[in-house]
Image (cartoon, rainbow, N blue to C red):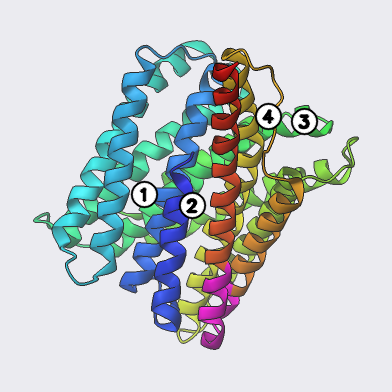
Amino acid sequence: MLTAPLFGIAGAALLLWGGADALQSRWQPLALAALHCFTAGFMLQAMVGALWQVMPVVGGVVIARQRLAAGASYLGLVLGATLLALGLSAVPGASPRMVTAGATLLALAIGILIAVSLPGLVRSRLGTESGRLLALALVGLGGTAIAGLVAAQALFGATALDDVEALIDLHAIWALAGWALPLVAAVALQFVPMFYMTEPYPRLADVYLACLGAGLLLAAGGFIGQGWLMRAGAALVAVAATGFAAVTLSRFAHRRRPRQDATSLGWQLAMTSLLAAVALLAVRMLGSSSSRAPAVEVAFGVFAVLGVFVTLIGAMLLRILPFLASLHLAAAGGGWRLDGAPSERWQQAQVWLQFFAASTLALAAGAPELARTSAALLLASQVLLARNVWGYAWALWRARRAVHQT
C-alpha cells in the first residue's frame, strides 16, 4: 500500500511528459506505459495489499506462510510492473525484453497469490456472496495475467499469434471486469453497510456474478474470431457494472450516517465515473465515427482506470491505513489513538483533485490543449495521495518511537 503512490506519480509524470501525443491513441507507447503504471503498478499493489487483509476476514481464509508468500509476490509485482512500464514506454534505453520480463514476473507473483489463497477461499467461504466475488476476482486476475503474458510474448517475444489486438482487448476486459470490479463489489457488500449505516445490498450477487461471468466467457469466446461474442460479453459486463454503480449510489443517498468523509466521497465519485465509462463504452460499441474512435477509447480508459479504480482505491487507503496503523500501535502498547495523521481536509482535497484530474484528462482526449494541464492535475493528485498515505506511516513510526522511549 505504501508503494502504490510511487507508481501513480510515475504514471502521471509520463502523461505530463508526453502531453497531447500520449493521448492520441490507446496504442501510443507513453499511454500504454502510463496505463500499466496505474493498473499493474498502483492498482495491483494496493489491491493485493488489501487482499491480504480482506481474505481472512471476509473469506475466512487461513494462509500458511503468509509473510513468505506476501514478500515473494510483492517483489515480483514491484519489479514486474517497473520493467513492464519501462519497456512499453519506448524511452531511450528501454528494451522489448523488459516487457516480456516484466509480464513474466507479474504472472509469477500473481500465481503465488492465487496458489496460496484461492484453495482456502474455495474450501471456506464460497457460500457467501462476498466469498464468491473474491473467488471470481482471483480467477479474473489469473486470466488477466495469462492474457497479458501471451500478448507480451506475441508482440515482443517469439510467440506467433494471428489476432494480437483481440487478445489485448480480452486482457483489458478481464483486468477491469474480471479482477478489479468483482473485488470492489466484494468489499462494497461488507464495507458500505457497516461503515455508513446503509441498507444491505440486495441479494443479487448471483445475478451479478452470472452477468459478469457470462460476459467474461463471451469475451473470451470472441478471441477465437467471432467479434460479436466479445461485444456481447462487453455489453453484459456493462449491464452488471451499471447495476452495481446505481445500487451503490442509492445506498449512499439514503445512508443513516450523513456525515461526508473522504472515503464516502471517493465511493460516490468512483461510481459516477463508472456510469460515465459505461456510457462511453456504449458510444464506442454503437459505432462512433472512425475519426473519433481513438478519443472515445482513451476517454473510456481514463474514466474506467483513473476515475473509478484509482479514485476509489485512494479513498479506501485513507480508511484502511489508519486502522492498520492503530492496530500496530496497539500491539506495541501505545493504545489505539494515532496522533499527527493527515487531516480530513487534505484527504477530501485529494479525492476531489483526483476526480477532477480524471475528468479533464478524459476531455483532453478530444481537446489536446488540455493534455498537459490535466496531467499536471493528476500528478498533483498523486503527490497529495502519497503525502496522505505516507503520513500514516510517519505518524505510526513517531508513535511507536514514543512508546519505546517511555
- As measured in the structure, the alpha-carbon distance from the residue carrying label 4 to the one carrying label 3 is 19 Å
Mark 3 vs mark 1: in front: 3
Residue found at the very far front of the displayed protein: 405
The Cα atoms of the two marked residues, 3 and 1, are separated by 40 Å
Q: Answer above or below: position of 170 versus 264.
A: below
| Separation of residues labelled 2 and 4 (CA atoms) | 47 Å
Secondary structure, mark 3, is helix
Q: Which residue lies under the disc numbered 2?
A: 233
Asked if disc 3 and disc 1 are in contact, CB closer than 8 Å, the reply is: no
Residue labelled with disc 3: 195
**Residue 359 included in the magenta stretch of the image:** no
Q: Is residue 372 magenta?
A: yes
Point out the stretch of residues depicted in magenta: 361-377
**Residue 171 in the image: above or below residue 92:** above
Residues marked 2 and 1 touching at CB (< 8 Å): yes
Nearest the viewer among 128 and 304 is 304
| Foreground label between 3 and 2 | 3
Determine whether label 1 and label 4 are within 8 Å by CB.
no
According to the image, label 4 marks what residue? 338
Residue 225 seen anywhere in this rendered image of the structure? no
The mark lying in front, picked from 1 and 4, is: 4
Q: Earlier in the sequence, mark 3 or mark 2?
A: 3
What amino acid does circle 2 point to? Gly
Q: Quadrant of the C terminus?
A: top right
Mark 4 or mark 3, earlier in chain: 3
In the rendered view, would you say 203 is above or below 68? below
Sequence-earlier tag: 3 or 1? 3
143 lies left or right of 158? right
Residue 239: % across, % down: 63, 51
User: Which is more foreground, mark 4 or mark 3?
Assistant: 4
Main SS category, magenta section = helix
